[in-house]
Amino acid sequence: MKGNRTREYCLIVEGTYLSESEAEHALRDPFIEDWVEQTGNFRIHNLGEIELTPGVVLGSLGVVMLDDELFEVSSTDPERPLTEHKARGVADALRRQGMFEEVSVELRDPDADANDSGTGDKSADEKG
C-alpha cells in the first residue's frame, strides 16, 4: 500500500511529573488498577496483556522525558510501531484516565531512534 516502512507516531504528553519513572507510573497505574478490578490480581507479565486500544498493549509503551513536565510516549517494540490510528486510540485512552494535562499525537522524529534505548537498534546495526 504505502510501501514497506510504516510511519511511526508517538504521543506528546504534559504532566506535573519530575522524572520519566513518575510519568511511566502515571501512564500505567490507572490501567493496572482497572486490570486488578476486572481480574482480581496483577503480575508483571500482565503488562503484555493489558490492551489500551486494539493492537497496543501497556507493556509495549515507553516514556522519555523531553523537557520539564513534557514526555514522549512511544512503542518500545520495533516490530510494532504506533501507527497514527493506534496512537490516536492510545491518546483517547490516556485522556479518559486523566493522568496528563495535555495529550497530543505527532509523527515521530526519525532521528529519535538514535537517541532513545527503546528503538535505537537500527542505528547500532548500521554502524556495525
Image: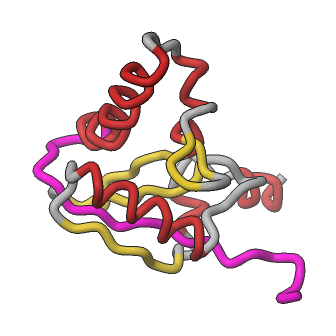
Give residue 36's position: percent from left, percent from top. 40, 19
Q: Is residue 2 magenta?
A: yes
Query: Where 71 falls versus 46 (above or below)?
Result: below
- The residue nearer to you, when weighing 57 against 21, is 57
Give residue 107's position: percent from left, percent from top. 52, 79
Query: Where 99 falls versus 29 (above or below)?
Result: below
Q: Is residue 110 magenta?
A: no
Location of the N terminus (image quadrant): bottom right
**Residue drawn at point x = 33 percent, y = 26 percent:** 33
Q: Main secondary structure of the magenta part?
A: loop
Task: Return the residue found at the far front.
Answer: 38
Task: Return the residue found at the far left.
Answer: 16
Per the rendered image, the range of residues in magenta is 1-20
**Residue drawn at point x = 41 percent, y = 66 percent:** 11
Give residue 116's position: percent from left, percent from top. 52, 52
Give residue 34's position: percent from left, percent from top. 37, 31
**Residue drawn at point x = 58 percent, y = 53 percent:** 75
Query: Where 29 falls versus 18 (above or below)?
Result: above
- The residue nearer to you, when weighing 97 against 8, is 97
Picture quadrant of residue 37: top left
**Residue drawn at point x = 29 percent, y = 67 percent:** 103
